[in-house]
């Protein structure tokens, strides 16, 4: 029995020594209408295996990317929908005798609401489109009127020539 406990302690000792050093501090920046750039502190413990970047759109956590290099501490999450709220987390997986994922504390989970396409932007876009449509319509009407005047002038010329002796 003592041998089993001793073996368990020897096997798990590196995991205990790594402890909370595997946790990272997560930040979100460069929030746009469809992406967020995440950055975190570098893992400073031993036995680093990988970072797993997760996204939660309200339906549950989904793995977005696995990063195998401990020096890469930034990732841009793309393909998100504007005006939606997302949560992000980065777990550090430490490999010793077994893989152990250190889950971040709630304070290291970042929640962000993406920018939306605002109403003033949509209104400005619609006004510009209406102006363009009006201008194109006016140009087409002028062109049609000029063509009709030319056809009338040509018809009048043909009539004059046919009336001449």
Image: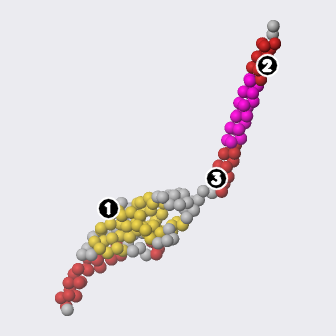
Quickly name the residue at label 2: 156
Per the image, label 2 sits on a secondary structure element best described as: helix
Question: Is residue 41 placed above or below 160 in the rendered structure?
Answer: below
Where, by quadrant of the figure, is residue 9 drawn? bottom left
Q: How many marks?
A: 3
Residue closest to the eye, 142 or 72: 142
Snapshot quadrant of residue 46: bottom left
What is the CA distance from the residue labelled 1 to the residue labelled 3? 41 Å
Q: Mark 1: give few (<14), some (14-19) or many (20+) Cα within 10 Å.
A: few
Q: Which residue is mark 3?
A: 121
| N-terminal-most mark, 2 or 3 | 3
Secondary structure state at the residue bearing disc 3: helix
Task: Tell me the SS state at disc 1.
Answer: loop
Label 1 to label 2, Cα distance in Å? 84 Å
Contact, mark 1 vs mark 2 (Cβ under 8 Å)? no
User: Which residue appears at 49% of the width and 71% of the height?
Assistant: 59
Which residue is pictured at 36% across the width and 64% down the height?
66
Residues drawn in magenta: 132-151
* 136 magenta-colored: yes
Relative to 46, 123 lies left or right: right
Quadrant in the rendering for residue 7: bottom left
Q: Residue furthest top?
A: 165
Q: Which mark's residue is nearer the viewer, 2 or 3?
A: 2
Q: Percent position (x, y) of residue 153?
A: 77, 21
Residue at 48% across, 63% down: 28
């Amino acid at each position: 029995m003592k041998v089993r406990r001793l073996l368990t302690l020897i096997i798990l000792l590196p995991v205990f020594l790594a402890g909370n050093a595997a946790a990272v501090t997560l930040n979100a920046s460069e929030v746009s209408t469809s992406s967020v750039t995440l950055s975190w502190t570098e893992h400073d413990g031993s036995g680093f295996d990988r970072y797993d970047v997760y996204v939660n759109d309200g339906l549950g956590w989904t793995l977005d990317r696995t990063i195998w290099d401990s020096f890469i501490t930034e990732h841009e999450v793309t393909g998100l929908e504007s005006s939606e709220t997302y949560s992000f987390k980065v777990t550090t997986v430490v490999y010793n005798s077994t893989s152990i994922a250190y889950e971040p504390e709630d304070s290291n989970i970042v929640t962000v609401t993406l920018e939306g396409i605002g109403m003033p932007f949509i209104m400005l876009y619609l006004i510009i489109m209406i102006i363009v449509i009006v201008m194109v319509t006016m140009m087409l009407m002028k062109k049609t009127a000029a063509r009709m005047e030319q056809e009338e002038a040509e018809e009048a010329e043909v009539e004059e020539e046919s009336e001449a002796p």
